[in-house]
Each structure stands twice: as structure tokens, then as C-alpha cells.
Amino acid sequence: MEKEIEGLNGIYKTIAQLTSLDDCLIIYQNFKGLSVTFPTKLIDSDYVKKHLRKELLREKILNKDEIQQLAVSFDYSERQIRRFLHEEKRKIQNDTVEEDGLPYVARWLKNQNDSED
């Protein structure tokens, strides 16, 4: 195996050593010629926000220890987790406000229909 990857170019050699020559060839076929950067965060922020939103919708109040545990689990800072929580709380409040507006519109439509009869 070492002989087979000896002649590979820099990054391909590293990929082959970390995975396998077959995996390296698949990566080569799919990404050759492209500049690829890897985000420093493995877990997408939208996924974290979705998880936090579920916690908020269950009316769960996260204490400091739970926020710290989530930060470690998702590899985000506590500050970022708190920021995400604040954003999701605001979205939930905005969704609730929009839902409250619908009955008024329904009453208005009913009044319009009643006045036409």
C-alpha cells in the first residue's frame, strides 16, 4: 500500500494515508481542480438552532450547566449557544404574534360576509 501512494501529490497522499487509496481516488474524481475549504465547525449552525428550538418549544428553560453541556456537545462557544437561543426565542415569539393576528382577519371577513347578506 505504501508503494502505491508514494507518488501521490501532497494532499492526495495524506488523504490516502488517513483513509484508503480507493477513498482517495473517489475524492480525486469528485473534487479534482477545485479549491476546497473545510469549515472549522463540523455541525451546521442551522442544525444546532433546530435542536435549541425544539427545547424551547417544549418550554424547557436551559440553565447555565445545560448551555455549557450543549456548547461542548456541538463544539460551539457558550456565547454562541446563547445567541442562537435568543434568535430562536425571537422567532418563536414572532410566529406566535402572527398566529394571534389570524383570528382578527377571520372576524373581519365574517363581518364583511354578514354585511353583504
Image (cartoon, rainbow, N blue to C red):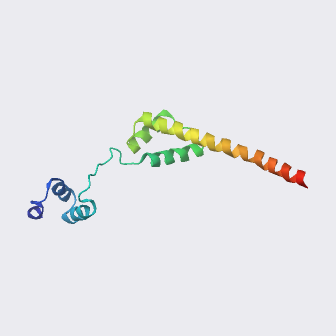
Give the vertical position of 28 relative to 102 (above or below).
below
Q: Residue drawn 62% across and 40% down?
A: 93
Q: Residue drawn 12% across and 61% down?
A: 5
Q: Residue drawn 58% across and 38% down?
A: 90
Pick out the residue farthest to the front: 116
**How many numbered circles are shown?**
0
Give the x, y percent position of residue 11: 18, 53
**Can residue 92 be seen here?**
yes
Give the x, y percent position of residue 84: 49, 39
Determine whether, in the image, residue 95 is placed left or right of residue 116: left
Determine whether, in the image, residue 93 is placed left or right of residue 30: right
Give the vertical position of 96 relative to 25 (above or below).
above
Give the x, y percent position of residue 107: 81, 48
Say which quarter of the image contains residue 56: top right
**Can residue 60 be seen here?**
no
Say which quarter of the image contains residue 117: bottom right
Determine whether, in the image, residue 117 is placed left or right of residue 61: right
Say which quarter of the image contains residue 96: top right
Q: Residue drawn 85% across and 53% down?
A: 113
Determine whether, in the image, residue 103 is placed left or right of residue 70: right
Q: Quadrant of the N terminus?
A: bottom left
Give the x, y percent position of residue 66: 47, 38
For this rendering, which residue is in front, 62 or 27? 27
For this rendering, which residue is in front, 117 or 31? 117
